[in-house]
Structures are given as structure tokens and as C-alpha cells.
Image (cartoon, rainbow, N blue to C red):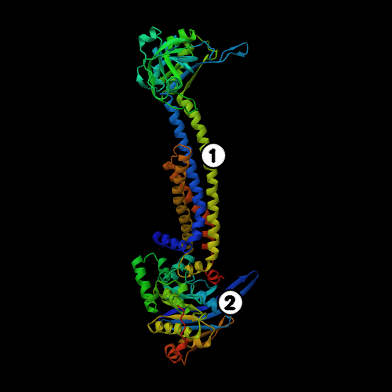
């Protein structure tokens, strides 16, 4: 018996019992649909988080002072004076895996314009900061080297600050505001950036030359952090190693001493977070997979009923020339058709479900080709695995007894 | 007429039921020539069903030889037997054994599905020819439940013809049919026999056995009597004498 015939015979047998075939498939359909939908939702949220994290900056490498302890009392990271502007210079000169380095000095304070005021963070940075953090100027300009050198009282506002002080969509370039009672001229406005992956408002900020913030607003001689860009994502680990090596040297740390700073990279952050979403995805997928297993058992059950019910048919087929293996193949083909067809419908349904769920959760659900291929392979295996035993039972029937079966 | 389709020599068949051995056939010698129309008779337990199973290559003898169309069946394994049945034999059963919810044509095609040498066009043509031979070409798209008992048995006979077998074996082919329809089926068998088909059927009705050319009666696992039918009945003639209102068709 060739395979076209086999397929046709099996298909005819299934068509004779359409409702039963459909109900049997339903188990597989639900199983596959839920696996596809779960994986798609997981993949979608993973991509969303990945997008949010990568929008935070360009292959960012962050250096923060380590927490200082004196006599067992933690003084907190921000109080540390470990990082100096000389560290920035050292990294700029020596690190080969870094393409841009900027200091960051932060100050928080009241910002006033006319009768409006708001509380925000003022970041003192250098020109490279824009590229590192993927910030863009909407109107006006960024400050230049002279303004950094002169500690000019110029600033660039984020959209949230603009909205709070001037109303949404206003263009306050050229106006003057008071930050901690010092007058600053607004020379630019940043483009809207939205929330970060961790739900932080990335537009609630003011940028100013680091010198101005350091001396005029915070009155400190250290810096709060260093932001840098690795030349590529792959170079991030090298960049981290380099930064550690250079800073340990400039900080004159002994071999045994712990780092007085912490270095993190964006890609590490990404890895940590995506590993969490991966676990979630696999967990959901595994739960959905159980329903697929239940669907497979449903197929086995129905195939057993079918073999018993069609004992006389099997006897007839054997008497007119069907060999045991032909009978076996026919029943296997039936269970495989059931599971594969269930798989096809399941994939379509899963895709629709994923899109629906995606639009409800305002994230894209992404159906990957791998999960579709995997679904089909699993369906095939289920068809063979759960069809095998009933098919064997059919194949081992004695034609004489089968023909007399009532 | 010396061309033997069936040649059986001192054939025995034992069944083991638990500790007990049942001797179903206790030494049978039988020859059936090409073109014969043989009725096997006997009470239940006489061994005639066992004989039919062995003749149909569904079962193998314990001792003795069975040659079908000159080939010894004893040496074949199950798969070879299946192939052999597919090429050499046609079966007709008491309860028709048609596939439900499958058209007459597809039912007739069925044996050819198990022959890989037959292409789908050939299969359809052979099935149509077989249906024509039993006079049902106008019912080829009917399902079994849309056909009368007699028509269903005709479809089954068409199915037994489709592979052009050397032997047609029928197990109580008229057992489920009324008198008139029984005669119609026997008419069809006689018709096929006239065209050269070798047919062996099992029956326990003596009047049905009279349509055959030879009767073989079994008793206690042995052939009790072998006889040429002297006053052979002609089904067509009998049908003509039957009243017309007895015609029952429910379609």
C-alpha cells in the first residue's frame, strides 16, 4: 500500500466520524494554541523589555561608587567620594573598548519659572552624554566645551519638566528658570523618551554642564557616576574589565582591597532581565504543554475505542489482503492526521489568541517560526506515540476472530 | 477440466483450548476444479467453518497440504498470506461487511487499495466493471444504508470480483436475506459461474445448496458425502415462477 492510498484510507475513516474526529482534535488544538500563545506572549514581552533597555543607552557601561563602610556603618553609595573627574579622563585616554565617556553629577532641587515650580533632578554631564544615553535635542542646542569650562548657567530640559513649568508642548528655549535659586538659561529641550523598562520617567530631568552642577549646585569636588559607551555590544565584557583595571590603578587599590566602585553594563542588565522573562515563558509553555499531553491521551483513548468499534472492519481489511503492518499504518496515519490537523488549527488559533492578548496587554505577541515548527514536531510525535499502542492492538487482531466480532 | 484450483491432501486442524485439544478437521481430501460451483454443507461443529477459513487462507492447517492455484499455502507467513488473499481470493460474508458511510464504489475499490501495483485510475475502472457485473452501476454513489440487503450483498460480491480472483469464497451468502433475494443472489452466482468463475460457498440450507454443481457435506471434521447435484436448480427459472409482489426493495 503506498502512502497516498494510506493517507486516503485514513482520511476517509476520519471523515466517516467527523464530529468525533473534531472533538478528539480539540484536545490537541487547545494544547497547541495555548503553547503557541504563551510562547508568543512571553517572546513579545521579552522583546518589549529588550527594546526598553536598549533605548536607555548605547552599549552603556555604568560606573557607580561602591557603598562606603566606616566601622560597619554603611554610608550609602551616593555619599561616596570615590569617583573623580580624573577617572573620566583616565578612562577616556586609556580604555580601548570605550567609545564615549561622560561624568555624571546629580543634584536635586526646586526649579522655578514665574509662578510654577517643580522638583526634579539636575544631571551635570559632558557632551558625550547625549550619545551614551540616546538622548536627542528637540529644539535649541546642547552646551559646548566652553560652557563646560566656564561653568555656564545653561540647561536643557526634559519634556516632563517642560510640561510641569510651561505646559505641554511649549518651547521654552531662550527663557530663564531658577534652579535652587540660581538663574539658568534654557538653551535646549530634549525629545520625549517615555518610561524606562523599570517604570522610571526618563523625561523628568534637567541637563547642565557637569562643572556647573558640581560647583554651583552641589558644591562637591567628586562625581556621582560615570557613563560610557562600549564600542559594541560584544565588547561590553572587555570594556567592564578595562574599566575595572584602569580605575583600580588610578584609585591605587591594593591587590587585596575590594573595588570602591561598581561597574555594570547594559547588556548584563539585559541578560538578567531576559533570563527572568525566559523562565516565565518556559514555565507558561510547560503548563500549556501539559494540556497538549492530555490532548494526546485523548487521541489514544479515541483510537482504542475506534479499534474496538471497527474490529469487523479490520477483519474485513485483513481478509481482502491488508497485512498487519497495513492495518497498523492505517491507524497510525489516522492518529497522526488527527494530531497534525489539530496542530495546524491550534497554531492558527494560538496566533489569533496571541494577537488578542498582545493588544489587550499593549505589547506585541511574537509567534516565532521555531515555536510553530516545534509545535508540529511535537504533534507528530504525539500522533505516533499515542497512536502506536491502539494501532498495534488492531494489527495483532486475528482476522477470523475479528470478522466474527459482534 | 483437470485444472485443480484447490487440492487438499489429508488435512488436519487442531485447536488448543486451554488443556483440551479440539480436532476440528480430522483428515480431509478435496479437489476443486476450475469453473466448479461447490456448496459446502454440514451442521454447526462439523468443521465446515474451519474448512472455509483454511480455504480462505485465513488459517493454516496443522497437518497436511493445501494447494491453492498450484501454490502450497502452508509455507507462507502471515504477510505473504495477506498478499496471496489479495491477489487470488474474493470473500463474500453473511453480513456483507461493507464499510459504513462509504459509497458502493469505494467499498468495491477497497481490495485494490492493498495492491500497490494498481493505480488509482485502474482501481476505479475495475470497481466500475465489477459493479456493472452485479448490475449496480446506477447505485455506485449510494451508501450501504441506502441499499437493500440484496443490493448490499451484490456490492459485496462486486468487491469479491474486483481483483479478478481465482476463487470466490462465500460464507452463508444468503443467510440474512429473504427467499426471493436469496434466489437473486444465487442467480448472480450462477451467472458468474457460467462465465467461468470458481465459487465455493458454505450453507446449511439444502435448497440453496441445490444451485451448486457439487455438494460436499462435512460431519465431525471429515467429509461425510460428496455428490454431484443431479437436479440442479436454475435460479432464473425459479424467479420467473415467483409472484411479482414478492419483490421487496426499500429505497
Q: Which of the image's four quarters has the C terminus of chain A?
A: bottom right
Q: Please name the residue shown 45% across and 87% down the image.
A: B213
State how many labels appear: 2
Chain letter belonging to callout 2: B
A26 relative position to A102: left or right: right
Mark in the foreground, 2 or 1: 1
Residue at 50% from the left image edge and 85% from the top image edge: B179
**Dot 1 surroundings within 10 Å: few (below 14), some, or many (20 or more)?**
some
Residue B59 is situated, as x and y percent measured from the top left of the image, at 52, 71
Which chain does tag 1 point to?
A
Figure quadrant of residue B110: bottom left
- Front residue of A85 and A388: A85
Q: What residue is pinned by disc 2?
A: B24
Q: Residue at x 43, y 82 (%)?
A: B189
- Residue A197: assigned label: none
Q: Nearer the viewer, residue B64 or B162?
A: B162
**In terms of depth relative to the viewer, which is nearer, B200 or A207?**
A207
**Residue A68 locus on image (x, y percent):** 56, 13
Q: Which residue is mark 1?
A: A283
State the residue in front, A353 or B119: A353
| SS label for mark 1 | helix
Q: CA distance from mark 2 to mark 1?
A: 63 Å
Amino acid at each position: 500500500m503506498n502512502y497516498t492510498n494510506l493517507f486516503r484510507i485514513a482520511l476517509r475513516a476520519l471523515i466517516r466520524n467527523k464530529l468525533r474526529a473534531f472533538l478528539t482534535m480539540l484536545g490537541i488544538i487547545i494544547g497547541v494554541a495555548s503553547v503557541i500563545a504563551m510562547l508568543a506572549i512571553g517572546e513579545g514581552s521579552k522583546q518589549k523589555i529588550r527594546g526598553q533597555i536598549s533605548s536607555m543607552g548605547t552599549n552603556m557601561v555604568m560606573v557607580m561608587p561602591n557603598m562606603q563602610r566606616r566601622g560597619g556603618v554603611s554610608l550609602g553609595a551616593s555619599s561616596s567620594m570615590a569617583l573623580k573627574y580624573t577617572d573620566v579622563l583616565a578612562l577616556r585616554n586609556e580604555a580601548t573598548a570605550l567609545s564615549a565617556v561622560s561624568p555624571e553629577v546629580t543634584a536635586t532641587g526646586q526649579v522655578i519659572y514665574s509662578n510654577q515650580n517643580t522638583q526634579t533632578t539636575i544631571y551635570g554631564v559632558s557632551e558625550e552624554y547625549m550619545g551614551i544615553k540616546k538622548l536627542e535635542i528637540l529644539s535649541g542646542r546642547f552646551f559646548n566645551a566652553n560652557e563646560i569650562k566656564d561653568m555656564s548657567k545653561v540647561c536643557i530640559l526634559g519634556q516632563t519638566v517642560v510640561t510641569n513649568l510651561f505646559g505641554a508642548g511649549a518651547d521654552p528655549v531662550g527663557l530663564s528658570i531658577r534652579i535652587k535659586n540660581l538663574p539658568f538659561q534654557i538653551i535646549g529641550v530634549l525629545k520625549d523618551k517615555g518610561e524606562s523598562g523599570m517604570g522610571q520617567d526618563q523625561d523628568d530631568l534637567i541637563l547642565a554642564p557637569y562643572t556647573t552642577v558640581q560647583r554651583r549646585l552641589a558644591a562637591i569636588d567628586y562625581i556621582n557616576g560615570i557613563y560610557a559607551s562600549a564600542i559594541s555590544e560584544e565588547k561590553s565584557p572587555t570594556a567592564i574589565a578595562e574599566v575595572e583595571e584602569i580605575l583600580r590603578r588610578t584609585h591605587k587599590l591594593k591587590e587585596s582591597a575590594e573595588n570602591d566602585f561598581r561597574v555594570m553594563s547594559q547588556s548584563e542588565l539585559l541578560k538578567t532581565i531576559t533570563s527572568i522573562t525566559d523562565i516565565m515563558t518556559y514555565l507558561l509553555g510547560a503548563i500549556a504543554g501539559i494540556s497538549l499531553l492530555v490532548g494526546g491521551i485523548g487521541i489514544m483513548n479515541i483510537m482504542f475505542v475506534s479499534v474496538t468499534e471497527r474490529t469487523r472492519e479490520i477483519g474485513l481489511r485483513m481478509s481482502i489482503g491488508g497485512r498487519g503492518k497495513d492495518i497498523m499504518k492505517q491507524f497510525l496515519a489516522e492518529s497522526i492526521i488527527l494530531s497534525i490537523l489539530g496542530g495546524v488549527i491550534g497554531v492558527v488559533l494560538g496566533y489569533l489568541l496571541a494577537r488578542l492578548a498582545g493588544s489587550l496587554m499593549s505589547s506585541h505577541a511574537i509567534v516565532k517560526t521555531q515555536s510553530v515548527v516545534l509545535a508540529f514536531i511535537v504533534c507528530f510525535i504525539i500522533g505516533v506515540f499515542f497512536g502506536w499502542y491502539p494501532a498495534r492492538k488492531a494489527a495483532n487482531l486475528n482476522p477470523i476472530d475479528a470478522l466474527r466480532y459482534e | 477440466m483437470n485444472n485443480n484450483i484447490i487440492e487438499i491432501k489429508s488435512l488436519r486442524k487442531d485447536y488448543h483450548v486451554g488443556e483440551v485439544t479440539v480436532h476440528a478437521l480430522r483428515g480431509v481430501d478435496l479437489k476443486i476444479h476450475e469453473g466448479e460451483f461447490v456448496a459446502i454443507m454440514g451442521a454447526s461443529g462439523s468443521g465446515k467453518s474451519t474448512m472455509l477459513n483454511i480455504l480462505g487462507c485465513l488459517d493454516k492447517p496443522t497437518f497436511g497440504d493445501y494447494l491453492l492455484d498450484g501454490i502450497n499455502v502452508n509455507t507462507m507467513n502471515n504477510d505473504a498470506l495477506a498478499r496471496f488473499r489479495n491477489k487470488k481470493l474474493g470473500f463474500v460474508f453473511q453480513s456483507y461487511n461493507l464499510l459504513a458511510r462509504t459509497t458502493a464504489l469505494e467499498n468495491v475499490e477497497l481490495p485494490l487499495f492493498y495492491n500497490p501495483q494498481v493505480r488509482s485510475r485502474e482501481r476505479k475502472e475495475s470497481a466500475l466493471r465489477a459493479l456493472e457485473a452485479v448490475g449496480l452501476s446506477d447505485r455506485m454513489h449510494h451508501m450501504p444504508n441506502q441499499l437493500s440487503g440484496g443490493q448490499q450483498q451484490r456490492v459485496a460480491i462486486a468487491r469479491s470480483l474486483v481483483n479478478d480472483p481465482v476463487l470466490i469464497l462465500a460464507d452463508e451468502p444468503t443467510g440474512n436475506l429473504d427467499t426471493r433475494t436469496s434466489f437473486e443472489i444465487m442467480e448472480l452466482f450462477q451467472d458468474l459461474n457460467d462465465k467461468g468463475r470458481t465459487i465455493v460457498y458454505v450453507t446449511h440450507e439444502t435448497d440453496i445448496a441445490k444451485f451448486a454443481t457439487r455438494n460436499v457435506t462435512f460431519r465431525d471434521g471429515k467429509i461425510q458425502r460428496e455428490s454431484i447435484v443431479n437436479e440442479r436448480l436454475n435460479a432464473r427459472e425459479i424467479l420467473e415462477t415467483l409472484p411479482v409482489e414478492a419483490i421487496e426493495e426499500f429505497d
